[in-house]
Image (tube, rainbow, N blue to C red):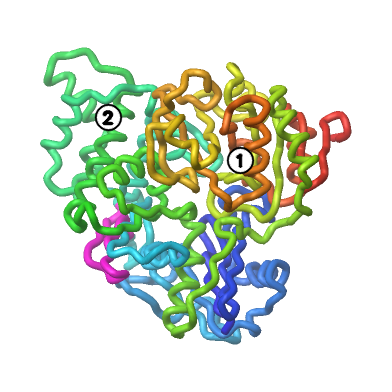
């Protein structure tokens, strides 16, 4: 059977095709080079289905879609698991709509089965009843059956009592800006580390919160900061301290929900947009060691969950998930030779900034060695150079790293595998300024044998420098999607201080590129 899962509108449109056990995936922002791209109509997606998969809707047996009916003014008044989708009436095959959070819960078929699935995001499924708007802001599933959730009424269309929405609001209070609101939480996650948690204020907030479902927005409001210090007759601390404290407060609230439903030895899935918060993930993982987080936990993973819903519905064999997470259907170069890999390693050792484009693109927002900008992590001012002259983003933003898996515990205070950069660890060494955040941590990736060319590059780099790790950030400008073509990489080489762009086995130097 040919079964297609689609995330259609709002943001982060994507496709996931199940074709008799084979899986193909596309996130559309990579081909349009528009961050968080989504369709604003119900027909353009068929063009990309033909272009990327060489299929027409009539070639499919069934489609499952995750869409926002409210944006089309369609009434949607009741919770549901699945239903017929009404806006693709001309499609030849049956089309179903899968509930947003259920699709998140089902989006990890490439991982071992979990007993509990926790979904935390800004807002999932939206409901419109006259002038009233509400939305599901978090859900708990046991064995993929809903057991608890919070559906909040949105006052004046403002999302309330949502972990994702409150974190986004906090970012605005911190005067952060982004081209797309989905990018605000990631910036705040970096910035909050510049403050210190005020434990007394944290206890004050915790004592006031009696119902996380109805009082989260009130508890996290900035007015609490001023009210608390006025009551205690103390000078107000900085906004950074407020951000750090609320960051931990929200983390503790999420932990409270997880503790209510799961035992520490249970195998749990953490997903939804909030599962991109590596600080929260790490705290949860340390208490619940059998936590699983997917690299596509944000809405780009919804197409995978919708596809899996169809596979289960039709009792089809489990898919083959080899090469995950290197799935994205973008431009694929030829494999690099050892000579090309050595050129890259020597350039990195010499302090050059290398654009590294290999194989298929990664699923998820983080580069994992196929669409990466690489640099020597021991260079003192590397972070400043990359932020100001390559990525064009705020100076407080840190950079991650990739380390050979077997060397992990020599460099990081973290002993569990981290292949998708979803956890953070304290750095044990003091000679890695480029990847050391202000709090002494680094978001790192552990690398085994799953990406041979990338592993060989780090091994060659270690032969020269003695370091079994390199700085790794995504191959894109700040606010832009990760590169999906050779042309995207060449634009970065021409317009930034990138020194070398390596596309497969092709090595291109800056002086060879004309803007």
Q: Is 149 one of the magenta-colored residues?
A: yes
Q: Position of residue 225 (x, y in %)?
A: 23, 26
Picture layout, residue 51 above or below residue 191: below
Which residue is label 1 attached to? 474
Q: Nearer the viewer, mark 1 or mark 2?
A: 1
Q: In the image, which residues are magenta?
A: 135-154
Q: Residue at x 62, y 46 (%)?
A: 481
Give the quadrant of the C terminus.
Answer: top right
Q: Position of residue 468 (x, y in %)?
A: 57, 33
Which mark, residue 245?
2
Q: Position of residue 124 (x, y in %)?
A: 38, 59
Give the quadrant of the N terminus.
Answer: bottom right
Q: Nearer the viewer, residue 100 or 416?
A: 416
Residue 55 falls left or right of residue 21 = right
Q: Residue at x 36, y 46 (%)?
A: 164
Label 1 environment density (alpha carbons within 10 Å; few <14, some 14–19, many ≥20): many
């Amino acid at each position: 059977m040919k079964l297609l899962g689609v995330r259609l509108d709002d943001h982060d449109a994507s496709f996931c095709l199940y074709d008799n056990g084979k899986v193909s995936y596309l996130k559309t922002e990579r081909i349009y080079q528009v961050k968080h791209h989504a369709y604003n109509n119900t027909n353009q997606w068929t063009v990309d289905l033909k272009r990327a998969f060489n299929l027409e809707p009539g070639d499919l047996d069934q489609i499952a879609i995750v869409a926002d009916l409210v944006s089309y003014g369609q009434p949607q008044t009741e919770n549901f698991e699945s239903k017929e989708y009404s806006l693709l009436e001309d499609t030849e095959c049956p089309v179903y709509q899968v509930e947003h959070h259920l699709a998140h819960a089902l989006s990890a078929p490439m991982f071992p089965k979990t007993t509990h699935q926790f979904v935390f995001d800004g807002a999932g499924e939206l409901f419109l009843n006259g002038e009233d708007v509400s939305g599901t802001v978090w859900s708990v599933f046991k064995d993929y059956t809903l057991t608890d959730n919070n559906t909040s009424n949105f006052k004046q269309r403002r999302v309330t009592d949502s972990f994702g929405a409150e974190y986004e609001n906090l970012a605005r209070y911190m005067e952060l800006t982004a081209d797309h609101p989905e990018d605000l939480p990631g910036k705040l996650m970096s910035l909050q580390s510049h403050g210190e948690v005020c434990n007394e204020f944290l206890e004050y907030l915790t004592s006031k919160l009696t119902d996380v479902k109805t009082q989260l927005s009130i508890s996290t409001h900035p007015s609490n900061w001023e009210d608390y210090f006025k009551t205690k007759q103390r000078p107000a601390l900085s906004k950074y301290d407020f951000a750090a404290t609320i960051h931990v407060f929200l983390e503790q609230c999420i932990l409270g929900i997880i503790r209510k439903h799961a035992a520490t030895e249970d195998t749990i899935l953490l997903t939804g947009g909030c599962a991109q918060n590596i600080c929260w993930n790490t705290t949860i993982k340390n208490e619940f060691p059998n936590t699983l987080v997917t690299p596509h936990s944000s809405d780009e993973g919804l197409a995978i969950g919708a596809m899996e819903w169809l596979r289960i519905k039709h009792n089809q064999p489990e898919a083959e998930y080899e090469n995950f997470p290197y799935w994205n259907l973008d431009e694929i170069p030829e494999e690099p030779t050892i000579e090309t890999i050595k050129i890259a390693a020597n350039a990195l050792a010499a302090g050059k900034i290398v654009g590294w484009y290999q194989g298929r693109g990664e699923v998820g927002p983080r580069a994992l060695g196929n669409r990466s900008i690489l640099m020597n992590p021991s260079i003192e001012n590397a972070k400043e150079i990359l932020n100001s002259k390559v990525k064009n983003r705020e100076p407080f933003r840190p950079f991650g790293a990739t380390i050979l898996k077997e060397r992990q515990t020599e460099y990081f205070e973290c002993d569990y595998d981290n292949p998708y950069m979803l956890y953070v660890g304290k750095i044990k060494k003091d000679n890695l300024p480029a990847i050391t955040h202000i709090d002494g941590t680094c978001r790192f990736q552990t690398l085994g044998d799953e990406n041979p060319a990338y592993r060989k590059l780090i091994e060659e780099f270690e032969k020269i420098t003695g370091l079994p790790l390199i700085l790794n950030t995504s191959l894109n400008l700040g606010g832009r999607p990760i590169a999906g073509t050779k042309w995207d990489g060449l634009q970065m080489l021409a317009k930034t201080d990138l020194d070398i762009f390596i596309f497969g086995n092709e090595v291109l130097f800056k002086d060879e590129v004309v803007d």
